[in-house]
Structure formats: C-alpha cells, structure tokens
Image (cartoon, rainbow, N blue to C red):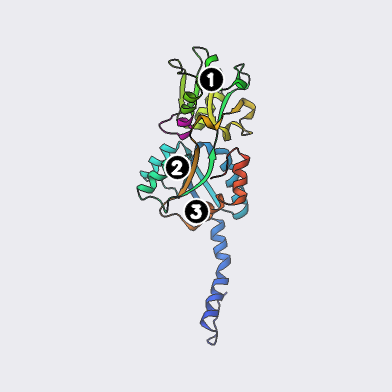
Amino acid sequence: MPVFWPSVLPWGRRQWLIAVLALPQQAKAQASARIKIAAASNLKFVLADLTSQYRQQTGVQVEVSLGASGNLARQILQGLPVEQFISADEDRVLELVKAGRTLDAGQRYATGRLALILPKNSALPLAQGLAAVVRALKPGDKLALANPALAPYGMAAQEALLRSGAGPLQAGQKVLGDNIGQATQFVATGAAQAGITALALAIAPELAPALQALPLPESLHAPLHQRMVLLQGASPAAMAWHRFLLSPPAQAIFLRHGYALPQ
C-alpha cells in the first residue's frame, strides 16, 4: 500500500516514520540471514548447542566449518569464504590479524581443558593418571592425539606427555589425528587404546557411551586460551552472532561443556 507524506509533516517526523515502517523488512532480512564461520574441532558440540539456540531466538542460521585451527587459518588466508574464525588458541587469530584479514584483534571467549580418554571397556589404569596409562600400554597399542603442528590441543597434549613424566612413547605408538575430533574418534572406535583430547569432547553425551575420561591437571600444559575474530567484510548478522557468543547466556553454555570463562 502506498504511503503518502503530508507536505506539512516535519522532516524529522518523516524520517522516524520511514524507520518504523522499515522494521518488519529488517526483521525479515535478519531472520533469513545465513552466516558462515570456521571453528576449531573441539567446539563441535558446544557450537551445536549455541547455533541451535541462536537460530531459535533470531531465525539466523550459522553454518560451521570445523577443522584444526592451523588448517582453518591457512584456508582463510587462501580465501575461505567465512565471516568469523573461532580458534582453539590465540596465535592463529593473531596470524590473521597481522595479515590484515580481520576487523580487529578479536576477543578471548573461553579457556579449554585436556582429558585423558580410553575406550569404555578398557582395563588400563585411567584413575592413576597419564603417566601410568602410558607405561601400561603394550608395544602394539596406540595413543591418539591431534597433530601438534596443526592443532593447539595436540600441542598441549604433547606438552602434557612430557610434563607428566610418562617418558617417550615407543616407536609407532603415537597416532596423530588431523584435528582433535579425529583423534577422539580413534579412541571412541577402538582404533587407539588411549588418547588425549579436549575435555569438551570427552564429556559430550554423544561420546560418553564409548569413552572413559579423566580431566588432566592444568599444570601439565600452557593455558588453552581460545580467541575468536570477525573477518574483513563480516555482515551485521555475523557481528550480532559474535556479540551473542560473549553474552552471559552463551558463556553459561561454554561452562556447561567443560570450558572455563576467559580471563
């Protein structure tokens, strides 16, 4: 229906009416928005909860590409079409900042933890800790972790092995996943007899039936501070999603999945 503006209507009032009439169209555009993001594999289950809740609240669909933080940062530099990068560490974000690919330096959103995992039916001495499990491995057994060259959780796992006093693994005992999700699956499927993964994956209801898990002391590795950043060209919808992740309701979901709040 056409809108007629009386010539006597003050200019400021006209602008206000135009803004009010545009609100339904803006809401509709927001509800149909799609955001593409890249995120570290340790975030698989927490992001499933967060994106579901956000879509229920706003109608916005967040499409997530999961992978090792190192691989994702490289792909973004090569032109991966995403609006946000949620890393498992801070260094990969800073690489993108230095390359001029981001809107700012990003924000720390959570701190992760490691967990030692075994298959559900394993008889290895999980309660005795990492060093005891490594010593109990047989020559043909495998211990899974993410590739330290690509995944921050893999680097932390390698550090934990050294600090725990477990000693070097025998030749062929270490199996590397391309990301922390793949390393976790090696244990869940029985392809590896033990593994070091993200606590958030180890306690996920989807994996709990297949795994035994023991949180590892934070003293065994450098803090797993995790940072996220908006990329150049990020849409208003992506910016709103980014703000949501820092909100108290979203932070409560991170806590429920085994993360600590950023410091």
Residue type beneath disc 1: Ala
Q: Which mark is residue 131?
A: 1
Residue type beneath disc 2: Glu
Kindly identify which residue carries mark 2: 90
**Structural distance between the alpha carbons of marks 2 and 3:** 20 Å
Residue type beneath disc 3: Ala
Question: Magenta span covers which residues?
Answer: 147-156
**Structural distance between the alpha carbons of marks 1 and 2:** 28 Å
Residue 213 picture quarter: top right
Residue 118, placed above or below residue 88: above
User: Is tag 1's residue or tag 3's residue first in the polypeptide sequence?
Assistant: 1
Kindly identify which residue carries mark 3: 238
Residue 26 part of the magenta-drawn span: no
Q: Secondary structure at mark 1?
A: helix
Percent position of residue 250, x then y: 60, 48
Percent position of residue 230, x then y: 45, 51
Q: Residues within 10 Å of mark 3 (few under 14, many from 20)?
A: many
Residue 19 in view in this figure = yes
Q: Secondary structure at mark 3?
A: helix
Residue 3 picture quarter: bottom right
